[in-house]
Every structure is written in C-alpha cells, then in structure tokens.
C-alpha cells in the first residue's frame, strides 16, 4: 500500500467473484489464474461500465510472496494482494513498449522502423506479421509470401521498442487510395 493513501480501484469500486481456488505459488497469478511475471501488464475486467479507452493498464513491478506491486499510469504505484487482484478482476494483457494494449489487426512499428501487423494476441505472446526481408526479428520465423511471422513475448516487445502506430484495421476503416478505386 502507498503510505497514507487508500489503494485505488482500477475499475471504480466493484467486487467480482471469480470462483474457484486462487493462490500464489512461485509466481503470482491474475484473477483468471494466468501466471504473472515482473514486466507484465494487467487491465481491470470487473463489471464496472468503463469505456475501453478509459481503462488504464498497470505494470507488474515486483512480486514478493503474496503481494504484487503494480505501477498504474493514472494512480502511481500500489501493492495488491490476491484478494485485491480477484476483486478488481485484474487480467494479464499484452501491451506495446509505451503501455498501450495490443489487439489483433493493429499496425505496430519497432524502434528501428520496421512495421508489422498484429495477427494474434495471447496470454503470453503476440504474433506479428512482418512484410519485409530477413532482419534481426526473423530468427525462428515462419516465412510466407516474402514476409515472416514472429512471436513476441512482453520482454521482446520492450527490448525491440514495439509500439502501436494505428488502431485495429477493420472493414469499416479500410480505405483504398489507389486511383483505380476512386
């Protein structure tokens, strides 16, 4: 807990019953049982009606026994125990190097300027589809159509400075700029 400040609710003030057993072992777990490590990101999934773009992400800074220290962009640094994590429905998510949640079909860019499309986001990794030739990211790649697919863990995203450069591409926001489309 932060000295002399009450712990903030990352989702206003809603209790969420997750059910099932919940315990910390060698590593902490989110409200849904997914393992948490230092450097991971979480979001609130409680039943409060908060617009998606207003939900701040928190970063796991330290894990010490049954306590997890989160750094919230909005509230600062606070310590939560397993009951707090369950109550607020904190769930592990993947985020770019700036702390923006990763979603399928977003365009991302590495620190070196290479662009990729996020094909899939899972609990512990994101699948990025690069369109360029072989680069430092292509080790262990799956080559298809001149590009390659690479799986990035959160540590890789941070290491290579991967950041979101566009909203997810959907049918509604695709635009043709070719003169034959006009």
Image: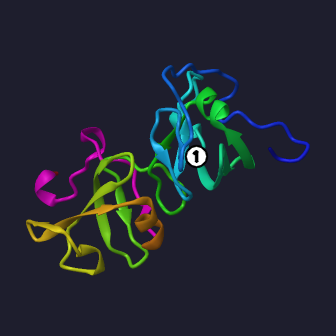
Please tell me whether residue 116 is drawn above or below residue 22 in the rendered image.
Answer: below
On-image quarter of the N terminus: top right
Q: How busy is the neighbourhood of tag 1: few (under 14 within 10 Å), some, or many (20 plus)?
A: many
Dominant secondary structure (helix, strand or loop) of the stretch shown in magenta: loop
Could you say where residue 66 lies in the image, as x and y percent from the top left?
65, 43
162 drawn magenta = yes
Q: Is residue 140 left or right of residue 21?
A: left
Number of numbered markers:
1
User: Looking at the image, which is closer to me, 24 or 83?
Assistant: 24
Could you say where residue 151 lies in the image, as x and y percent from the top left?
29, 61
User: Looking at the image, which is closer to me, 73 or 27?
Assistant: 27
User: Looking at the image, which is closer to me, 139 or 66?
Assistant: 66
Label 1 residue SS: loop
x 55%, y 59%: residue = 39
x 56%, y 19%: residue = 17
Q: Is residue 26 visible?
A: yes
> Start and end of the magenta stretch?
161-181
User: Looking at the image, which is closer to me, 24 or 108?
Assistant: 24
Residue, disc 1: 57
132 drawn magenta = no
Please tell me whether residue 110 is drawn above or below residue 107 in the rendered image.
Answer: below
Q: Is residue 162 visible?
A: no
Could you say where residue 158 lies in the image, as x and y percent from the top left?
48, 67
Q: Is residue 61 left or right of residue 161?
A: right
Please tell me whether residue 147 is drawn above or below residue 89 in the rendered image.
Answer: below
x 78%, y 37%: residue = 7
Q: Is residue 78 left or right of residue 44?
A: right
């Amino acid at each position: 807990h932060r000295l002399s400040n009450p712990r903030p609710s990352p989702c206003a003030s809603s209790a969420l019953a997750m059910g099932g057993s919940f315990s910390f072992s060698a590593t902490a777990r989110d409200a849904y049982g997914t393992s948490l490590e230092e450097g991971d990101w979480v979001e609130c999934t409680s039943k409060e009606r908060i617009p998606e773009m207003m939900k701040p992400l928190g970063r796991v800074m330290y894990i010490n026994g049954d306590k997890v220290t989160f750094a919230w962009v909005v509230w600062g640094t606070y310590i939560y125990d397993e009951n707090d994590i369950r109550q607020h429905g904190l769930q592990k998510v993947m985020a770019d190097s700036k702390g923006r949640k990763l979603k399928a079909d977003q365009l991302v860019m590495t620190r070196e300027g290479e662009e990729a499309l996020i094909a899939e986001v899972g609990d512990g990794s994101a699948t990025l589809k690069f369109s360029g030739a072989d680069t430092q990211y292509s080790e262990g790649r799956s080559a298809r159509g001149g590009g390659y697919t690479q799986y990035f863990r959160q540590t890789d995203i941070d290491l290579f400075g991967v950041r979101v450069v566009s909203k997810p591409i959907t049918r509604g926001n695709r635009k043709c700029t070719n003169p034959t489309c006009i």
